[in-house]
Image (cartoon, rainbow, N blue to C red):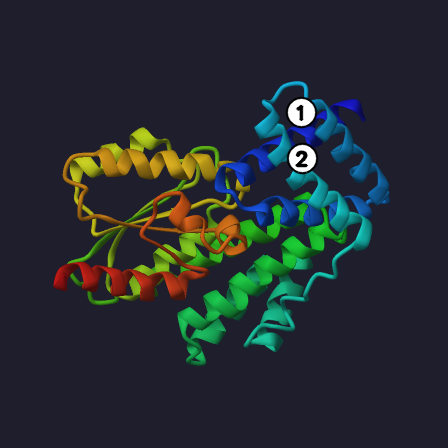
Amino acid sequence: MEAKCLEDIRYHLQYLYEALQAYDKNLFTHYIHWVNDVLSSRNIPTKELIDSLGCLKNVLKQFLSDEEASLAGIYLEEAIDILKLQAKQDQPDFIERSAMQHECKHYLHLLMNQERHAAYSYVHTLLQQKHSLQDIYLHIFQASQYEIGRQWQENKISVAQEHYCTAVTQQIMSSLLPHIFTTPKKSMRMLACCTSGELHELGLRMVTDFFELDGWDTCFLGANTPEQAITDMLRQQSFEMIAISTTMTFHIDKVRSTIQRIRAYPGSENTKIIVGGNPFNIASGLWKNVGADAYAGNAQEAVAVANLICASSVTA
């Protein structure tokens, strides 16, 4: 129990640090809401989280300058006040919000019952019924992944179930590549990567596939990409666009340093950088703070934004 408490406090500090770096309280308060929901669903009272944040505030005074401790204290106090006013947030059902609600619900049912082959067949049947790949990605794959995350957060499914469902969706996406690679290509290249330490790559994979469907030639480096690996690719090939993704807020600083390294690399002056992932959905101006050229909330937006800013740079 002590080890778990220490781990939680480390996470609190990491999220607080990134929020302070970005000058955005929403990054921390959103995280605290999430933590409270996770703990509450596991029968851990909100008061324990409030007490933990209060202790953290007092301890930080001993290690930070007066100015730093004051700002950190403001963020912590706001989080505590929110917890006192509203102990638990109601999370939306992402299936109900899907434009393909019936299909998404059935797909998720198959995943939850570990019917991998049936899920595979169902997706390919939808494709044969003239549903577009883009709709399947956004309204089935993305919506079901959000719903799976929500159900884990509320302690309705285990980590193992969450990982299984994600793995099956990745396998099915791989089976769709022959349909994606038949798209006529244009002379535009995009490099896609997650920051070092970031293990959530499914969202970025969706983004990459959407670029392929739009005719871009893509290079998908996937999860946990070291900065050196990115510059190695830049040495071999030029790219009009680089997409960087992170799901965990405590990787924002790595996004920032990765962008700085790309900007400093000779020959990358005209390369545009787009970012995405949960922290950027929470904090609207965060993409500017890390030095990116743009932000997108999903794969469809990413392609539209990329085409727009690349076209603008050509005509400028």
**Residue 130 spot, x, y in % from top left:** 41, 80
Sooner in the amino-acid sequence: mark 1 or mark 2: 1
**Residue 118 spot, x, y in % from top left:** 58, 65
- Residue located at (19% from left, 64% from top): 311
Q: Is residue 181 visible?
A: no
Above/below status of 309 relative to 286: below
Total numbered labels placed on residues in the image: 2
| Residue placed furthest toward the bottom | 129
- Residue located at (64% from left, 41% from top): 75
Residue pointed to by mark 2:
73
The N terminus - image quarter = top right
Number of residues whose C-alpha sits closer than 10 Å to that of mark 2, classed few (under 14), some (14–19) or many (20 or more): some
- Residue located at (20% from left, 63% from top): 312
Q: Are marks 1 and 2 in contact (CB under 8 Å)?
A: yes
The image quadrant of residue 230 is: top left
Residue 117 vs residue 50, the one in the foreground:
50
Residue 219 placement, left or right of 162: left
The image quadrant of residue 94 is: bottom right
**Residue 246 spot, x, y in % from top left:** 47, 44
- Amino acid found under the numbered disc labelled 2: Gly
Above/below status of 308 relative to 72: below
- Residue located at (77% from left, 28% from top): 55
Residue pointed to by mark 1:
60
Residue 181 vs residue 128, the one in the foreground:
181
The image quadrant of residue 80 is: top right
Q: Is residue 40 visible?
A: yes
